[in-house]
Amino acid sequence: MAKSLPPKERVKIPRQGMPEQDAKQRARNFEEVNLGLEVVAAESEAQRCLSCADPKCVQGCPVGVKIRDFVELVLDGEYLKAAAKIREDNVLPAVTGRVCPQEKQCEGACIMGKRFSSLAIGNLERFVADYERQTGEIGLPERAPATGKKVAIVGSGPAGLSCAGDLALHGHDVTVFEALHEIGGVLLYGIPEFRLPKDIVRGEIENMKKMGIDFQTNVVVGKSVTIDELFDEENFDAVFIATGAGLPQFLNIPGEHLGGVYSANEFLTRVNLMKAYDEENYDEPVYKCRDRNVAVVGGGNTAMDSVRSAMRLGAEHAYIIYRRGEEEMPARGEEVHHAKDEGVEFLNLHNPIEFIGDERGVLKAVKLIKMELGEPDESGRRRPQPIEGSEFEMPLDVAIIAVGTGANPLVQSTTPDMETNKWGYIVADDDSLRTSKKGVFAGGDIVSGAATVILAMGAGRTAAKSINEYLNTGEW
C-alpha cells in the first residue's frame, strides 16, 4: 500500500505539476487556466506526505484544515470522505484550492519544503472538491440540534460565508445579507473567471443552502436596514459584520477623472458581474480594450487579475506599472508567472505622475517617472524614490488603478455607538472579534484591511466561535 512507503522513498517522488491551458490560447479566453490533477497524479502527490506526528501545515492554515487526515483519505481512495473532512473546517474547498496562497501558508509550513518541494496541498484540496462536485455527492458535516438563536451575517464574501457555515453547524439560525444581486462578495465580483469560475462559487453557495443557511440579496445593511433594526425589529441575537474593504484608493494625480481610467474594483466588477468577457451577448460594460494599450498600476493579485482580464478583452499591449521591483511584488508568484507567459509587459520601477487626455476628455497617454529603491520602509520593503529628470510619456487608452482599498463607511455611519479607527475600519478585539457594541462582531477586511480570502475565512471562523460562546452564555 502507498502509505507503507518509508519516508526516504516518499521524498523521492517528484511533486506533481498542475496541468494548465496553453499560454497563447488562454491569453484570449476566460476559461480556467489551471486544469486540475488527474486521479493518478493526485494519488502520487498524496504519497509524498510524511504524515507528520505534529503537522506544521495545519498550524500554517488560517482555518485549521486537518490536512494530514484528508490526505490520508485521498491515499485510501476515499475522495468524498476527504472532502467532508476538509468541510469540517473550510466551507469553500473548491474556492480555496484555487485562490489560496498556499505557498505562504500551509505549504510554506510543510516540513518537506525544507529540503524538497513542499506537498501540493492546495492542488489536492482542489482535486477532492472537484471530484465531489463531479459526482454530485456532497459530504456535508452533521449539524447540531437547532438552538433557536438567530444570527445575521452582513456580507457574503469569504469571512461571512465561513462564519455562516460554522454557526449553522452549531445549530443556529443564520441569515446572510448581501448588498449585490448575487451571493459571493469578492469571490464573484473581484476574481476573474479564468482563475475562479463562477459556477464553482455558485456550487459552494448551493451546498451552504443545503446546510439551512438563508441568503438574502439586494439588502444594503446601513441603508435598507440598520444594525439596530436587525436587533430591535428583526429579533436577531447577534450580528457579524463582514463587509470587506471595498472602497477603492486612487493615486491622486492629475487626469484620474478622464474617460478610460478605472479603479480595479469597478473594472473587475464590470468584467465579472456585467459579463464584459462575453461581448457577443452583452453590451460592452467597459471602455473598449480590444486593440488598445491598457495599463494596470499596482503589483498585487488584484493588479494581475486586472491586467490578465484586459489581455483577454483583446488589448494590443497590456502593461503592469509598479513602482518597486518584481521581488517586492505582493502578488503570488504563480500569478506573475502566468501573466508573463500570456504576454503581459512589466514596467517595474516606474510610477505614473499624470494621465493625459484628448480634447474629448478621454485618456490618450500617461506620464511616467522612473524609480530606484532606497532604504526599507515600515513594510520591510525598500522604499521607491523617483529619479530626477527621468519622466517620459507613453500612449495609453485604458488605465486601471489597483493600489489597494479602504473601508466602506456605510455600516459604520449608521451605527454611531460602534467604535472605528482613524481609517474608518471597525475596531474589534483581536481574539474574540467583539466590537464596542453589544452583540456585534466584525472581522475580515473591514477590520484588518485588505487581505487574502483564506485570512478572511480564518476571521470568520474566529467570529463564529466567539458568537457561539456569547449565544450560549449571554455574557459580553
Image: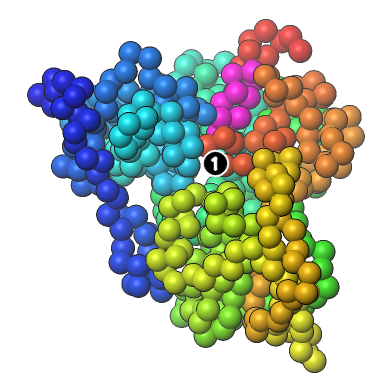
Estimate the x, y position of residue 454 in percent, counting from the top left: 52, 37
Query: Magenta stretch: residue 153 in it?
Result: no
Residue labelled with disc 1: 453
**Quadrant location of the N terminus?**
top left
**Quadrant location of the C terminus?**
top right
Residue name at image x 75 percent, y 63 percent: 386
Q: Mark 1: which amino acid?
A: Val
**38 to 84, vertically: above or below:** below
**Residue span colored magenta:** 457-467
Estimate the x, y position of residue 71 in percent, counting from the top left: 28, 28
Residue name at image x 37 percent, y 39 percent: 122
The reply to whether residue 204 is visible in this rendering is: no
Does residue 66 appear left or right of residue 75 in this picture?
right
Taking the view exactly as shown, the residue that stands out farthest to the bottom is 359
Estimate the x, y position of residue 126 in percent, counting from the top left: 34, 42
Query: In front here: 65 or 180?
Result: 65
Residue name at image x 67 percent, y 19 percent: 431
Mark 1 burial class by Cα count in 10 Å: few <14, some 14-19, many 20+: many
**142 to 458, vertically: above or below:** above
Estimate the x, y position of residue 450 in percent, counting from the top left: 66, 44
Does residue 168 appear left or right of residue 417 in this picture?
left
Magenta stretch mostly in which secondary structure? helix
The reply to whether residue 292 is visible in this rendering is: yes
Query: Magenta stretch: residue 462 in it?
Result: yes
Query: In front here: 320 or 268?
Result: 320
